[in-house]
Amino acid sequence: ERSLHDALCVIRCLVKERALIAGGGAAEIEASRTLLKEANSLSGAEQLCLAEFAKALEVIPTTLAENAGLNPIEIVTDLRNKHENGEREAGISVRRSGATNTYSEHVLQPVLVNTSAITLGAETVKSILRIDDIAISR
C-alpha cells in the first residue's frame, strides 16, 4: 500500500514539473559542493551559515549509504571526489553497491522532490529562528 502511494506521489510530482534529475544523493552532493565553494568566498556568519547548510545536504547521501548497508564515510568521500572531478551525476546505486553515474543507471528522481524538501527545510529553520528570536527578546 505504501509503495503504491509513493508511486502515485512520484507521478503527481512529474505532472506538476516534468523534470528528472540524477538520484542517489547526486544532486545533494553537487549542491553541497557548490555551496561550500561559495561559502569559502564569504566571511563571518554568512560563511558559517552557508557551510552548515552545505553540510546538512550531505546527510541525505550519508543516510542512503547507511540504509544500503554501505560504509557512509567511504561512499560520501568517493562522491565528493567524483563531483570534484566533474562527475556531476555520481550518486549511490544499490545495484552497484557504491558510487556510480546514477543517471546512466536510471536512478532518477523528480526535481520537485528536491526543491520541495530544500524549501521546506529552509522554511522550518526560519520558523525556529523566529521563535528563538522572540524567546530571547522576552
Image (tube, helix red, strand yellow):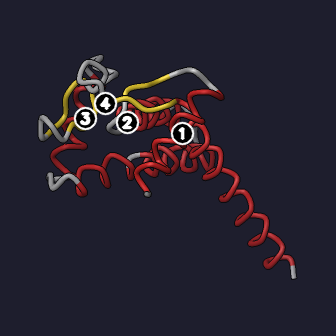
- Of labels 3 and 1, the one closer to you: 1
Badge 1 or badge 2: first in the primary sequence: 2
Q: Where does label 3 land, which residue?
A: 79
Position of the C terminus, as image quadrant, is bottom right
Badge 4 or badge 1: first in the primary sequence: 4
Q: Residues within 10 Å of mark 1 (few under 14, many from 20)?
A: some
Which structural element holds mark 1? helix
Which structural element holds mark 3? helix
Given residues 59 and 64, the one toward you in this image is 64
Residue visible at 65% across and 29% down in the picture = 16
Position of the N terminus, as image quadrant, is bottom left
Could you tell me how far apart the alpha carbons at marks 4 and 1 are, in whole angstroms?
Answer: 14 Å
Q: Is residue 3 above or below residue 35?
A: below
Could you tell me how far apart the alpha carbons at marks 2 and 4 are, in whole angstroms?
Answer: 15 Å
Q: Residues within 10 Å of mark 2 (few under 14, many from 20)?
A: many
Q: Where does label 4 land, which residue?
A: 107
- The image shows residue 62 at horizontal and vertical percentages of 30, 51
